[in-house]
Image (cartoon, rainbow, N blue to C red):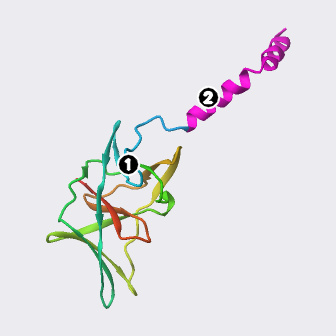
Protein backbone atom coordinates (compact mmCIF):
# COMPACT_ATOMS: atom_id res chain seq x y z
CA UNK A 1 0.00 0.00 0.00
CA UNK A 2 2.80 2.44 0.86
CA UNK A 3 4.48 1.77 -2.50
CA UNK A 4 1.25 2.49 -4.34
CA UNK A 5 0.82 5.84 -2.52
CA UNK A 6 4.43 6.80 -3.21
CA UNK A 7 3.99 6.00 -6.91
CA UNK A 8 0.75 8.01 -7.02
CA UNK A 9 2.42 11.05 -5.42
CA UNK A 10 5.37 10.85 -7.80
CA UNK A 11 3.06 10.28 -10.74
CA UNK A 12 1.04 13.41 -9.90
CA UNK A 13 4.31 15.32 -10.34
CA UNK A 14 4.01 17.73 -7.46
CA UNK A 15 6.92 16.43 -5.38
CA UNK A 16 9.70 17.38 -7.78
CA UNK A 17 8.59 21.02 -8.30
CA UNK A 18 8.14 21.48 -4.53
CA UNK A 19 11.56 19.98 -3.85
CA UNK A 20 13.19 22.22 -6.48
CA UNK A 21 11.48 25.31 -5.02
CA UNK A 22 12.76 24.43 -1.55
CA UNK A 23 16.31 23.96 -2.80
CA UNK A 24 16.20 27.24 -4.73
CA UNK A 25 14.89 29.11 -1.67
CA UNK A 26 17.74 27.70 0.41
CA UNK A 27 20.30 29.14 -2.03
CA UNK A 28 18.91 32.69 -2.18
CA UNK A 29 19.81 35.50 0.16
CA UNK A 30 17.32 35.70 3.00
CA UNK A 31 19.13 38.55 4.77
CA UNK A 32 19.44 42.24 3.95
CA UNK A 33 20.52 43.16 0.41
CA UNK A 34 22.96 46.04 -0.20
CA UNK A 35 21.41 49.23 -1.59
CA UNK A 36 24.37 50.02 -3.88
CA UNK A 37 26.34 47.56 -6.02
CA UNK A 38 30.12 47.12 -5.74
CA UNK A 39 30.24 48.45 -2.19
CA UNK A 40 31.00 46.17 0.77
CA UNK A 41 28.63 46.62 3.70
CA UNK A 42 29.40 45.56 7.26
CA UNK A 43 26.76 43.17 8.56
CA UNK A 44 25.62 44.20 12.05
CA UNK A 45 22.83 41.84 13.17
CA UNK A 46 20.14 42.44 10.50
CA UNK A 47 21.46 45.86 9.43
CA UNK A 48 23.99 46.77 6.74
CA UNK A 49 26.47 49.60 7.32
CA UNK A 50 28.26 50.99 4.26
CA UNK A 51 32.05 50.99 4.38
CA UNK A 52 33.88 54.27 3.73
CA UNK A 53 34.46 54.70 -0.02
CA UNK A 54 37.73 56.42 -0.85
CA UNK A 55 40.67 56.44 -3.24
CA UNK A 56 44.22 55.76 -2.07
CA UNK A 57 46.89 58.13 -3.33
CA UNK A 58 49.89 56.21 -4.66
CA UNK A 59 53.46 57.47 -4.24
CA UNK A 60 56.45 55.60 -5.67
CA UNK A 61 59.46 55.53 -3.38
CA UNK A 62 62.92 54.08 -3.89
CA UNK A 63 62.16 50.92 -1.86
CA UNK A 64 58.45 50.46 -2.70
CA UNK A 65 55.07 52.06 -3.19
CA UNK A 66 53.23 53.98 -0.48
CA UNK A 67 49.41 54.20 -0.51
CA UNK A 68 47.80 57.02 1.53
CA UNK A 69 44.19 57.54 2.49
CA UNK A 70 43.03 60.90 3.83
CA UNK A 71 41.91 61.03 7.45
CA UNK A 72 43.51 59.51 10.52
CA UNK A 73 40.49 57.27 11.17
CA UNK A 74 37.60 55.83 9.25
CA UNK A 75 34.17 57.14 10.26
CA UNK A 76 32.83 53.57 9.80
CA UNK A 77 33.49 51.46 12.88
CA UNK A 78 32.68 47.96 14.08
CA UNK A 79 33.16 46.31 17.46
CA UNK A 80 33.43 42.91 15.75
CA UNK A 81 36.93 41.43 15.63
CA UNK A 82 35.89 39.07 12.82
CA UNK A 83 33.50 41.19 10.77
CA UNK A 84 31.20 39.93 8.05
CA UNK A 85 30.47 41.89 4.87
CA UNK A 86 27.73 41.66 2.27
CA UNK A 87 28.32 42.92 -1.27
CA UNK A 88 26.19 42.98 -4.40
CA UNK A 89 28.50 42.92 -7.39
CA UNK A 90 28.32 44.32 -10.89
CA UNK A 91 31.99 45.06 -11.67
CA UNK A 92 33.96 43.91 -8.60
CA UNK A 93 35.07 40.29 -8.37
CA UNK A 94 34.60 39.14 -4.75
CA UNK A 95 37.35 36.48 -5.00
CA UNK A 96 39.90 39.17 -5.87
CA UNK A 97 39.17 41.55 -2.96
CA UNK A 98 41.94 41.87 -0.38
CA UNK A 99 41.78 43.03 3.24
CA UNK A 100 44.77 44.90 4.69
CA UNK A 101 45.46 46.68 7.94
CA UNK A 102 46.42 50.34 7.57
CA UNK A 103 48.67 52.38 9.85
CA UNK A 104 47.47 55.77 11.12
CA UNK A 105 50.16 58.37 10.56
CA UNK A 106 49.18 61.91 11.45
CA UNK A 107 46.14 62.88 9.42
CA UNK A 108 46.20 59.89 7.11
CA UNK A 109 46.16 56.11 6.94
CA UNK A 110 48.83 54.34 4.93
CA UNK A 111 50.34 51.06 3.80
CA UNK A 112 53.60 50.40 1.96
CA UNK A 113 54.32 47.58 -0.47
CA UNK A 114 58.04 46.97 -0.87
CA UNK A 115 60.05 45.85 -3.87
CA UNK A 116 62.56 43.69 -1.98
CA UNK A 117 61.29 43.37 1.60
CA UNK A 118 58.44 41.21 2.81
CA UNK A 119 55.09 42.87 2.09
CA UNK A 120 52.13 43.06 4.44
CA UNK A 121 50.00 39.94 4.05
CA UNK A 122 46.28 40.32 3.43
CA UNK A 123 43.84 38.80 5.88
CA UNK A 124 42.02 35.81 4.44
CA UNK A 125 38.34 35.99 3.55
CA UNK A 126 35.78 33.24 3.06
CA UNK A 127 33.39 34.13 0.25
CA UNK A 128 29.93 32.65 -0.05
CA UNK A 129 27.58 33.24 -2.99
CA UNK A 130 24.11 34.08 -1.67
CA UNK A 131 22.54 34.30 -5.15
CA UNK A 132 21.62 37.23 -7.44
CA UNK A 133 25.25 38.50 -7.41
CA UNK A 134 25.13 38.95 -3.63
CA UNK A 135 28.10 37.62 -1.67
CA UNK A 136 28.97 37.22 1.99
CA UNK A 137 32.61 37.88 2.94
CA UNK A 138 33.77 36.62 6.32
CA UNK A 139 37.14 37.44 7.86
CA UNK A 140 38.78 34.17 8.87
CA UNK A 141 40.79 35.48 11.80
CA UNK A 142 40.39 38.05 14.56
CA UNK A 143 41.44 41.54 13.58
CA UNK A 144 43.25 43.63 16.18
CA UNK A 145 41.84 47.09 16.86
CA UNK A 146 42.83 49.44 14.06
CA UNK A 147 42.15 50.75 10.57
CA UNK A 148 41.45 48.46 7.59
CA UNK A 149 40.82 48.59 3.86
CA UNK A 150 39.19 46.16 1.45
CA UNK A 151 40.51 46.76 -2.06
CA UNK A 152 40.60 45.18 -5.49
CA UNK A 153 44.24 44.41 -6.45
CA UNK A 154 44.16 46.34 -9.74
CA UNK A 155 42.75 49.59 -8.36
CA UNK A 156 43.42 52.32 -5.78
CA UNK A 157 39.79 52.15 -4.71
CA UNK A 158 39.51 51.46 -0.99
CA UNK A 159 36.58 50.50 1.22
CA UNK A 160 37.64 51.41 4.75
CA UNK A 161 36.46 50.65 8.27
CA UNK A 162 37.86 50.50 11.77
CA UNK A 163 37.73 47.79 14.42
CA UNK A 164 37.56 49.15 17.97
Quarter holding the N terminus is: top right
Instruction: Reply above or below: 45 against 135.
Output: above
Report which residue position mark 1 lands on: 36
Q: Nearer the viewer, mark 1 or mark 2?
A: 1
Give coordinates of residue 5: x percent, y percent. Answer: 81, 11
Give the CA distance from mark 1 to mark 2.
28 Å
x, y percentage for residue 104?
Answer: 20, 68
Which residue occupies 30% across, 61% down?
A: 148
First in sequence, mark 1 or 2: give its number. Answer: 2
Extreme-top residue of the structure: 1
Does residue 22 appear to the left or right of 107 in the view shown?
right
Neighbour class for label 1 at 10 Å: few (<14), some, many (≥20)?
few
Which range of residues does the magenta coloring cover? 1-27
Horizontal placement of 11 versus 18: left or right?
right
* Residue 149 location (% of width, % of height): 32, 62
The residue lying at 85 percent from left, 12 percent from top is: 4
Q: Is residue 33 left or right of residue 111?
A: right
Under circle 2, the secondary element is: helix
Looking at the picture, does residue 35 appear above or below residue 97? above
Is 87 colored magenta in this rendering?
no
For the residue pair 109 and 103, the one nearer the viewer reads as 109
Extreme left residue here? 106
Residue located at (83% from left, 17% from top): 7
Can residue 9 be found in the magenta stretch?
A: yes
Q: Which disc number belongs to residue 157? A: none
The secondary structure that dominates the magenta segment is helix
Which residue is tagged 2? 22
Q: Residues within 10 Å of mark 2 (few under 14, many from 20)?
A: few
Amino acid sequence: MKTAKRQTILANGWVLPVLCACLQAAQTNSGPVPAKPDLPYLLHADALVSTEITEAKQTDQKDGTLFRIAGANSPVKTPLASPTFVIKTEKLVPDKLQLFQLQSNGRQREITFYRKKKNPAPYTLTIKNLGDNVYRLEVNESLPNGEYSISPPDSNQAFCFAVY
